[in-house]
Image (cartoon, grey):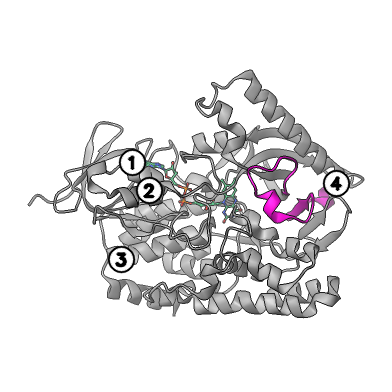
Amino acid sequence: MEKADYNHVVVGSGISGMTAALLLAMNGKKVLVLEKAPVPGGSMARFRTGGIPFDTGFHFTGGFSDGGLLYDMLTVLGLREDIEPVFLTEEHANRFVFEQTGEVFDFPAGESRLKAQLQHYFPAEHAAIENYFNLVNQVCHQTRTMDIRQINAPMELLDEDYLSFQTVLDRLTENQQLKALLSGFSMCYGSAPVEISFANHARMCQGLYQSVARVKNGGEAFIRAFKQAFSKLGVELRCGVSVIQCLDIQNGQAGRFLLSSGETVSFESAILTIHPQEALKLIPAEFMRPAFVNRVNSFEPSAGFFSVFGVFEVPHAAMDNSMVSLLPHTDTNRMLDPEQPGDSALVIIRNIETVNGKNVQTVSAFEPCFPQETVAWSRSTVGHRSPEYYAYKARKTGRIRERVNAFYAGQNGTFKAVDSASTLTFRDYLNSPDGSAYGIRQKTGQFNLIGKLPVRNLYLAGQSSLLPGIVGAMMSSFIVTRAVVDKIKFNDLICERLR
Ligand SMILES: Cc1cc2nc3c(=O)[nH]c(=O)nc-3n(C[C@H](O)[C@H](O)[C@H](O)COP(=O)(O)OP(=O)(O)OC[C@H]3O[C@@H](n4cnc5c(N)ncnc54)[C@H](O)[C@@H]3O)c2cc1C
């Protein structure tokens, strides 16, 4: 049999693809990464307007504290020193504001401080708050794969995987305001409390309760670090080329990919880090059962965002890295319901960027929205949209600007919007099928797709496989890569790096 061009091809160069490729190379494999976009990084990439950098997807994360999941994964990858977290530790750095009443709730860093603060805000709910954090910790403790030293443990489902987050909230308290605050981080996974399981909510949020951090130079810091490691280990990265189809499927295994350039590449196995519905399109229908296809096609999109990017003219001393979530009411389900009109939550992220040696206060404001909102223009592409679409964007931008300015009124500054993006913008720049921010919607009792596909040497990882966000996406790649390489060697590598 002819030798394959590569041991492994990784499709997609977002955080999942970069993680998988580096892990494979660290295990001595010859790896090719294929990326459809002209630049690597997927949702980690930044863009510049007037020389000012803005983040496309990734803005902040949990898991960066010593021994946190992200901290450990970066340690194993040998990249921790290259990526500098900027922790939001100031008292008011992470706040929730109810717009109708003007009430403000600060979320301090550290779970015990946060718990005490919430108990201070809601003294009558002392026990409910205690129970909530106990339940979150219990789920995370029982989820053995949340410690990457135990990545070899089977992924067992817990009772809380079959309970919606809303059910747990309703059992804990009747206080609507507290429920809204406890579900405030739903915007970090884009599924409503009635939909997501309590277990997945807990797994997503525990790290954010411990610490919230931005990263110096945003996602670009990750991309740079991965690229350096790729050159050291000989990982090939090709951008501007996509995988079109799987070829030479024999005995349930594929031999080659047909690329958009017309070339083919052969491999022993491949890890796809793209949307599951896109992965399906690469496999000829005769190799998949209809029930499998139906399951994958039944996955619905998570929320996306309408985003406004701008600068805030403030005195130097008033510049900060912070995050404010404006909540128009206390019903998080309504905020994440595609059918509900009106304002949703607005997450405002302030960041200090250095441009030409000067500090600039940037602001990115994100309001969840769904592809339904832009369906009328879904056939159009970037730069070729109708005047009605631009009117829609102007209307949304105006309303968001109004909300941002109302919140910061009297704070000695004015928000100037310089760019905006709809779910269509995200769809087209990130090559996702629907412009959702987090891939598929996380639903109680839904079995996501991770690992082996019906063509046995094709594996699926990525944000839709396990959990979204950079931590969930990277975790999926750790789990899937372990399935592809020598498991003992892989476990030894993790233990050795984390010693
Ligand atoms: C607006 C927004 C805000 C967000 N904020 C945060 C945040 O603050 N914190 C956080 O942790 N997460 C955030 N996320 C989510 C986070 O960015 C993602 O969960 C994560 O980065 C996804 O990584 P991925 O590698 O799985 O997918 P992606 O980053 O989407 O990468 C997939 C890559 O595959 C490529 N591709 C697609 N099809 C093909 C093909 N056929 N051939 C070759 N290449 C292909 C795409 O071009 C893309 O580069 C946000 C997302 C968005 C959109």
Q: Quadrant of the C terminus?
A: bottom left
**Foreground label between 4 and 2:** 2
As displayed, is residue 257 above or below residue 332?
A: above
Q: Amino acid at mark 2?
A: Asn
Q: Which residues are magenta?
A: 316-345
- Asked whether the residues under the numbered discs 4 and 2 touch, taking CB atoms below 8 Å apart as contact, a structural biologist would say no
First-in-chain label (1 vs 3):
1
Label 4 packing within 10 angstroms: few (<14), some (14-19), many (20+): some
Name of the residue lying farthest toward the left: 1
Q: Position of residue 331 (x, y in %)?
A: 74, 55
Q: Disc 2, ligand 1: is the CB inside 8 Å?
A: no
Q: Disc 3, ligand 1: is the CB inside 8 Å?
A: no
372 or 402: nearer the eye?
A: 372
Q: Which residue is mark 3?
A: 483
As displayed, is residue 96 above or below residue 311?
A: below
197 or 428: nearer the eye?
A: 197
Q: How many angstroms separate mark 4 from mark 1 (CA)?
A: 47 Å
**Residue 237, visible in the rendered structure:** no
Left or right of residue 225: residue 209: right
**Foreground label between 3 and 4:** 3
Q: Position of residue 148 (x, y in %)?
A: 44, 73
Count numbered badges in the picture.
4
**Foreground label between 2 and 1:** 2
Q: Which residue is found at the position 66% from the left and 34% from the top?
A: 420
Query: In the rendering, which numbered label is found on residue 301?
Result: none
- Asked whether the residues under the numbered discs 3 and 4 touch, taking CB atoms below 8 Å apart as contact, a structural biologist would say no
Query: In the rendering, which numbered label is found on residue 281?
Result: 1
First-in-chain label (2 vs 1):
1
Find residue 409 and report its image quarter: top right
Q: Disc 4, ligand 1: is the CB inside 8 Å?
A: no
